Amino acid sequence: MRTKVAIIGAGPAGLMLGRLLDLNGIDNVILERKSADYVLGRIRAGVLEQGSVDLMERAQVSRRLHAEGLVHHGTDLSFDGDRVRIDFTDLVGRHVMVYGQTEVTRDLMDARTGQTIYEADDVALHDLDGKSWVSWTKDGVSHRLDCDYIAGCDGYHGVSRASVPAAALATFERVYPFGWLGILVDRPPVAHELIYAHHERGFALCSQRSPTRSRYYVQVPTDEKVEAWSDDRFWDELRRRLNAETAEALQTGPSIEKSIAPLRSFVAEPLRFGSLFLAGDAAHIVPPTGAKGLNLAMSDVAMLADALIEFYDERSNAGLDFYSAKALQRIWKAERFSWWMTSLMHTFPENGAFGRRIQRAEFDYLASSRVAQQSLAENYTGLPG
């Protein structure tokens, strides 16, 4: 079996890359170790920058996005009950779209015309410096796929980055001493836009998936167990961290999903190793505070798709050779913004009273400075590729 591009991972990054290649007549095969139902069952955030919306349009999968997505022209930040609204449209002339990552994945799955092999076990990458090939087993039968290039879109724990010799890879990481306890609930959102709240008890986020489905988070220690949090305990804690008006308006209900996500910042360099290119969570992780994870993955595969299209259309290696450096420029800017948002909005007990006063001064500066607000809006809505 042979193809031009083997794509490892059928999340939104792998599916988007496959879709862009399909539309340009470039043969590709996607390998995914989980089932299609499992992939669709993963609950993830979905705040799309304008660039990601544009990419959905380019991929011809934007019909439901525009019909069901929620346009957000701004966001609210709160510090001990004091609030400031960041008006994206007024400040930078852009907005974001709330549309769940699950829905992005579904749209790309439905549009897929190339071959996707789900439940591919024991995936292994071979001869990255030569005539590359990928092996896997399915239903106890071994398979081989020869290819020109491999796109590693299989996430932080995937096989792609693990296939790179350790001496050829530099990694940069910060693990935060807390996670996000999140619940999904079928109740209308407490506000039309997201609310990021800093409180001495910890961070909180009021988010949404639709006009009738909400997603809420509270900061918890890394060793916290989700089983220790009843719905009532969660709602009580969330209310404490919101200002009085928002807490009063909150509509509670039984959770339909509850989980704890750890927070980390991570980057691997470079993103190319012979025929292998890393993209999405295989290459980088950002804290969810800045809503950059999915958008960075979309940016990566847009660059990689353009480079592959250039190679097969023009026989030029320029885009492929520059992919890693170009993608990393955007990645590190997003890492910086996500780190900054995380540092501002979360509690860090080890920083003491001085550290919290610095956070308060940062918030007050943001609330009083249009220039500071423009910087936040520019980064949040998406920097140029």
Image (cartoon, rainbow, N blue to C red):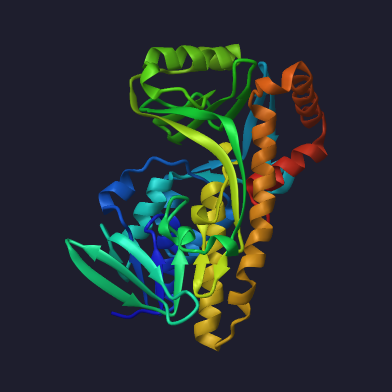
Name the residue: 45% across, 53% down: 155
Name the residue: 40% across, 55% down: 11
**View extreme (front): residue:** 167
Task: For residue 235, say whether it is visible.
Answer: yes
Task: For residue 53, say whether it is visible.
Answer: no
Image coordinates for residue 286, horizontal then vertical, percent: 58, 44
Instruction: Judge from the rendering whether residue 129 lies leftward or rightward of residue 258; answer left or right.
Output: right
Image coordinates for residue 306, horizontal then vertical, percent: 55, 73
Decide: is 319 above or below 351.
below
Image coordinates for residue 68, horizontal then vertical, percent: 42, 45
Instruction: Judge from the rendering whether residue 147 lies leftward or rightward of residue 178; answer left or right.
Output: left
Q: 235 or 29, which lies in front?
A: 29
Q: 352 or 290, which lies in front?
A: 352
Name the residue: 69% across, 59% down: 329
Image coordinates for residue 231, horizontal then vertical, percent: 38, 17
Q: Quadrant of the C terminus?
A: bottom right
> In terms of image quadrants, where is residue 27?
bottom left
Decide: is 252 above or below 308.
above
> In terms of image quadrants, where is residue 176?
top right
